[in-house]
Image (tube, coloured by chain):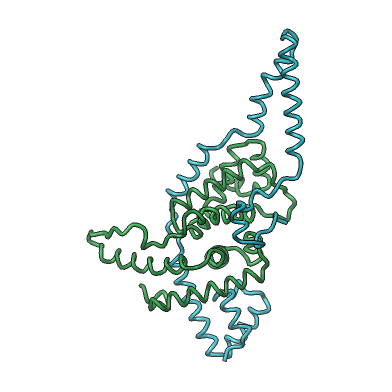
Amino acid sequence: MQGNRLGAFDQVSDDALLAAVAQGDREKFAMLMQRHLPAALALASRMSGRPEDAEEIAQDAFLKVWVHAARWQADGQARFPTWLYRVVYNLSIDRKRLKPFVALEEEDDTVDTGPDGAEIFERGEAERVLHGGLASLPDRQRAAVSLCYLGEASMAEAAEIMGLSVSAVESLLVRGRRALKAHFHAQGLNSLGDIL
Amino acid sequence: MIPTRLDLALDRYGSDLTRWPPDLAAEAEAELARSEAFRKALARENGFDALLRAADPARRVDTAALVRVQAMVMANLPPARRDRTAGWLGPLVEALSPGWGWQRSLAAMLVLAAMLGMAAGSAMPVPDWTAPSAGATLASKSFYRGDLQ
């Protein structure tokens, strides 16, 4: 029974859900959000670097979807996720003008003193170093890396989300990758083995 | 010696050959079979990609965050457009019915006419709401497009 219900959920297209949302259907809106919130929140956290900001960005993005659902045109070409990520991307850029990306070292410095404290601390240090790399990238390089390397977007989708040409995204990826490598190498990290 | 095309492709597409354009991926497969230098370069990029994934801030997103966001959104949904319209329209239509004074009927007609005007206005082309604010647009000059294709 449960399997049948899940199957039916999967079979409803985004376009059909959006058409219902445009009519004020909260249940279909919840389904749409359930389907796309994980990826939207992931992109927001990659762009903002701050979990609480990421949650607010994702909330704002879905509220915009609710309000503007009637303007979605199901023409078979545009994909809803691309539309949504574009909203998340732009909200992140807007918010970043108010609050810059935060590297982990500027956040909570609490050290766990429990039995596994040392291990957790070491892992936390590694995470700080790694996170600092992303934090050091300019917005658009971080967006390209977030969408293509960490997310599942193709170059063409990333270009559409960011409002750039594919070649511009490729260029951002090359520069972002080289900058991250330089950052990691400067910290003595060349592979995952260096921090495990 | 690694061909420049493949060296650049490593920087551009990373170590996962399934994400490379098919022609370049085929070229890379052939190079892998004959070049130790390329195998090492690909292994290095693979190590870097693993580092990058370890640095992914999205790894800190958990189920609790998803539940929290969904609950916040559902709790803060504004009334649907249809509900809002019904809320205004009901009393206005009632005011037009016989039994009400002509002043009230006239006022209701004027309000309805204004609403029709606004509805006509809302049918006009609107700017792209997904675009960043004016400040962001200015800051990034021409890098944003007007709307999605």
Measured from the top left, where is residue A116 in percent x and y? 25, 62
**Chain A rendered in what hue?**
green
Residue B58, placed above or below residue A173: above
Residue B21 sits in quarter? bottom right
Number of dots carrying numbers? 0
Quadrant in the picture for the C terminus of chain B: bottom right
Residue B93, placed above or below residue A57: above
Looking at this view, is A129 or B32 the one in front?
A: A129
Measured from the top left, where is residue A87 in percent x and y? 60, 52
**Would residue A130 be seen by someone viewing this image from the given angle?**
yes
Residue B28, placed above or below residue A88: below
Measured from the top left, where is residue A8 in percent x and y? 61, 45
Quadrant in the picture for the N terminus of chain B: bottom right
Q: Residue at x 62, y 54 (%)?
A: A81
Q: Residue at x 50, y 68 (%)?
A: A137
**Chain B rendered in what hue?**
cyan
Measured from the top left, where is residue A59 in percent x and y? 52, 46
Residue A115 sits in quarter? bottom left
